[in-house]
Image (tube, rainbow, N blue to C red):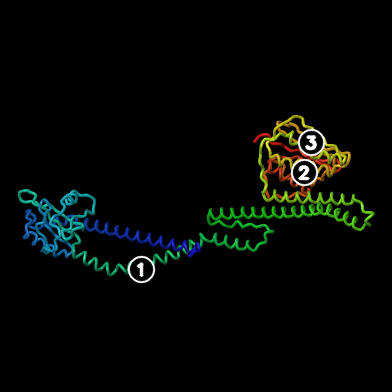
Amino acid sequence: MNRLFNRLFLASTIIVLLLFVALWQWLQLNHEFSRNQIQQSLHLQLAEHMAHINPLLSQGITSDAALKEAFHDFMLLGPSFEIYTLDPDGNVIAYDAKEEKIKTHRVDTAIIQQFLNGVSLPVLGTDPRSVDTHKIFSASKLVTKDGLHSGYLYVIIGGEDYDSWQALINAENQPKIWGATIGFWIIFALVLFVILLRYFTRPIQKLAQDLTELKNTPMSDKLMLPQRYRGSLEISQLSHHINHLLQEIQLQQQQVKRQQQAKHDFLLHLSHDLKTPLTALLGYIDTWLILPEHERDEALIQYAANSGQTLQQLLAQLLELAALENGQIDAQLQQVNLSELLSDIEQTFTPRAKKLGVQLDFDINHASQIYTDPALMRRILNNLVDNALRYTPAGGKIQIVNAQHNGQQWLTVRDTGAGMHKHEVDALKQLSMTRLSFEANQSLPQLGVGLAIVRQLLGLLKCRIEIDSQPGVGSEFKIELVTQG
């Protein structure tokens, strides 16, 4: 019963049966109305003719004697008529039945007047043999020789005997008629709705079949439903939406594959970054161990310590990058003095720059306020300056400059180091064409941990970055700062 076809069939069958019962009742009422109209029309002047041909009734006499003589004449017409004489107020004076059969002794004369005035038939009047039943009738005024209105001749058409025979015949024939009619309609409904439902549900069956076939289709193939659902607009729209969802799924799958490949490449690059200081660390220690004690140089231990610090820094950056990707770091934005922030960074890196023989030039044109997270912005600049120091040879120069351009505040970190190749620059630019929003599932560039952290942090701060770099010439990172919240 959970199948759409079965539910539609059951609901449609019930509706058809209810409509059939309603139609049958309407036909019965319409048949009865037409029959009463015809019979009353045929016997419209029956009472008038009867009063005319009866000597007593024609003189306006309404006694039992007049009625008995009229009833004797009426016997020729059969038992389907009941006759009564009424006074001018509608009270029953004489009748052709036993006393106990008369349930009401007064007839509504207003209905009789409507009949005599020629209103549309059928007109139903009071049945003296029933309290609630109304029947068709024929009526005529009775007038005395003096022209006085003495009463009415009131004839019920289709009396009690007629109703009894009619009920008996109906009781015998009604089950046959109902059985044959219901059987015909059930068979007709079955055939009709099987055809219609098969026709209307065929697109759904095709859709279910195509979806079953797609279930066994590799995701690498182009998933698409065929455009063959012409049964209804809803099915066509449903197939269109399913195709749209399939396209979205395929795009997301391709994006996931690209992200996985990018992470794989990044891990390879990271392993190289980790392997270099680790190899140096182990090499210096091994060299120190194999040398005789009097030839062991403390510089080897210092070199090993430096490699260990580099390895420790890389691991710390890797943990920081993982925290960024998992959304564990939030930006706490506030107004920050840019001059004070850059002054702290200059003090941090000046000793190391002097030791490496690299010139640091912090050119702050004017003090300004920016809207950022001071801790995250410090990390970004620390990573950029640290990366510049690592790749800038002795005698090189690193500059940090702030400037206004088209009403926007920019901060530039420029070095004369080794520079980056185009594919590395493109990897960092892929999310910097517009304002960034941090998404943990974005693919990682092949740039090393430091610059990957820079990109993620800029995404948190919603800052745009422009990169210009050439191998052997140097690199330039321009960060668009946010000045107001």
Q: Amino acid under label 2?
A: Asn
Nearer to us: label 1 or label 2: 2
What distance separates the C-alpha of mark 1 from that of mark 2? 93 Å
The answer to which of marks 1 and 3 sits earlier in the sequence is 1
- Can you give x and y, in whole percent of width and height, for residue 328 in the image? 67, 49
Residue 233 placement, left or right of 293: left
Q: Amino acid under label 1?
A: Ala
* Residue wearing tag 2: 383
- Can you give x and y, in whole percent of width and height, for residue 206 in the image? 57, 61
Residue 289 placement, left or right of 254: right
429 is higher (above) or lower (below) than 2: above
Q: Secondary structure at mark 1?
A: helix
Residue 135 in view of the camera: no
Residue at the extreme top of the image, as rendered: 366
Q: Secondary structure at mark 3?
A: strand
* Residue wearing tag 1: 180
Question: Residue at horizontal 18%, vertical 65%?
Answer: 161
Q: Around disc 1, counting alpha carbons within 10 Å, would you say few (fewer than 14), some (14 to 19), or many (20 or more)?
A: few
* Residue wearing tag 3: 400
341 is higher (above) or lower (below) than 141: above
